[in-house]
């Protein structure tokens, strides 16, 4: 019986040893994880245009609210909103009859004053003659000293009468000029060339100073006004090019030039206003349009530019972040320093060099040392 059991025991031991050997073979022969397939690009220097984004409204540098200077009824106002006018062109007419009569009255007063002056001068000449005669008679004893003083007083009074008549004449002439101006003011002229933006009165309306009549704008001279954060002001200078778009013309780009930067930063917004002179020679832009654009602050001919999607950062405003590059088929984390941003691309000022193989896709599978393979 013991002889029968011995071979069976040997078989059991042999089977167990064989099973262990097979298990060991399977563990040793397990294949490594497959490499992560991702997008890998080779970094090459390229031009990068630095910009500062801006938004704001287009404003006419020539916007005039024209008001009445006289009292009367509007008898003519032919222009409509949107109509162009030239500088010096009559736009509104106010009834003139009362002002014509006032001018005639003032001119008559001038003629009366001229006659009064001439009369005063005649009396002055007579008084001087009487004074000379009195002085001669005094020497011969023909009159008394009292009579001489009376003649002197009469001569002085005649001189005062001439001065008064002359002043009254000048006053009357000034009244004529005032009356003429009021008559001229019955025709309200356009002070500048432009377009009528808004009418406030129509024919038949009664106006008096300072009733607003119409608003005139010159759309050939527009400017874009936009706040710029104080953090970006260091790179913004007068004369830099600005490009922008408006909703009225999708896909059309307009140009301008920085004319002035506000000397002070607003304490509440921490931004300074920038005024951009706009080229509107085509006449398509209108005052009041909302514009979005950018100030082109400079061009770097050879910059390390990478897609925004390649950068890992907790805060969009953070300048210190990291990327992954492929080295010897494995992902390697690389700390980078971000410069400027534009059109979903970032300028890298430190951490990358030409020829680096950048992994441009973010993935939870990527980590230091993980095998990677280009798609």
Image (cartoon, grey):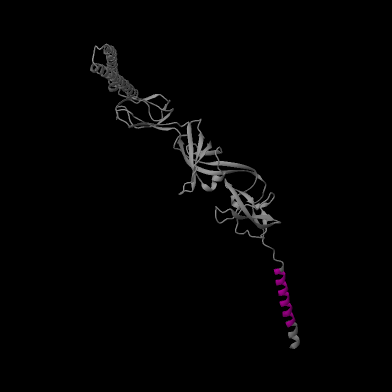
Q: Quadrant of the N terminus?
A: bottom right
Taking depth in this image into account, of 250 and 234 the one nearest to the observer is 234
Q: Going by the picture, which residue comes out furthest to the bottom?
A: 1
Is residue 298 visible in the rendered structure shown here? yes
Q: Which residues fall within the magenta stretch?
A: 9-27
Q: Residue at x 75, y 81 (%)?
A: 10
Residue 212 vs 271, above or below: the answer is above
Answer with the quarter of the image where residue 52 lies. Answer: top right
**Does the magenta portion include 77?**
no
**Does the magenta portion include 11?**
yes
Residue 344 vs 193, above or below: the answer is below
Answer with the quarter of the image where residue 99 lies. Answer: top left
> At which x and y percent is residue 276?
51, 38
Q: Is residue 340 left or right of residue 111?
A: right
Is residue 253 visible in the rendered structure shown here? no
> At which x and y percent is residue 41?
66, 50
Q: Main secondary structure of the magenta part?
A: helix
> At which x and y percent is residue 96?
30, 22
> At which x and y percent is residue 9?
73, 82
Residue 163 vs 334, above or below: the answer is above
């Amino acid at each position: 019986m013991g002889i029968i059991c011995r071979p069976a025991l040997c078989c059991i031991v042999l089977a167990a040893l064989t099973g262990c050997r097979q298990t060991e073979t399977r563990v040793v022969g397990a294949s490594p994880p497959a490499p992560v397939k991702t997008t890998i690009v080779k970094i090459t220097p390229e031009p990068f245009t630095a910009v500062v984004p801006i938004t704001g409204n287009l404003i006419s540098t020539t916007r005039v609210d024209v008001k009445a200077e006289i009292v009367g009824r509007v008898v003519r106002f032919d222009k409509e909103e949107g109509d162009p006018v030239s500088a010096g062109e009559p736009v509104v007419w106010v009834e003139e009859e009362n002002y014509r009569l006032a001018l005639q009255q003032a001119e008559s007063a001038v003629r009366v004053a001229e006659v009064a002056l001439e009369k005063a001068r005649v009396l002055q000449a007579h008084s001087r003659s009487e004074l000379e005669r009195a002085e001669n008679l005094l020497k011969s004893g023909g009159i008394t000293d009292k009579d001489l003083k009376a003649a002197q007083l009469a001569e002085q009074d005649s001189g005062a009468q001439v001065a008064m008549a002359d002043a009254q004449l000048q006053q009357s002439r000034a009244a004529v000029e005032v009356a003429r101006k009021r008559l001229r003011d019955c025709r309200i002229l356009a002070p500048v060339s432009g377009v009528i933006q808004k009418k406030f009165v129509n024919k038949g309306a009664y106006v008096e100073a300072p009733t607003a009549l119409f608003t005139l704008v010159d759309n050939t001279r527009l400017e874009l006004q936009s706040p710029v954060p104080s953090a970006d002001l260091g790179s913004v200078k007068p004369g830099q090019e600005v490009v922008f778009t408006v909703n009225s013309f999708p896909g059309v780009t307009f140009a301008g030039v920085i004319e002035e930067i506000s000397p002070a930063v607003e304490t509440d917004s921490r931004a300074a206003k920038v005024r951009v002179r706009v080229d509107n020679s085509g006449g398509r832009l209108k005052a009041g349009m909302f514009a979005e654009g950018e100030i082109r602050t400079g061009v770097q001919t050879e910059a390390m530019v990478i897609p925004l999607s390649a950068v890992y950062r907790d805060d969009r405003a953070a300048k210190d972040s990291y990327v992954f590059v492929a080295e010897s088929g494995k992902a390697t984390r690389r700390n980078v320093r971000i410069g400027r941003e534009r059109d979903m691309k970032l300028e890298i000022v430190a951490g990358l060099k030409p020829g680096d193989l950048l992994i441009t896709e973010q993935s939870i599978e990527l980590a230091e040392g993980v095998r990677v393979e280009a798609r």
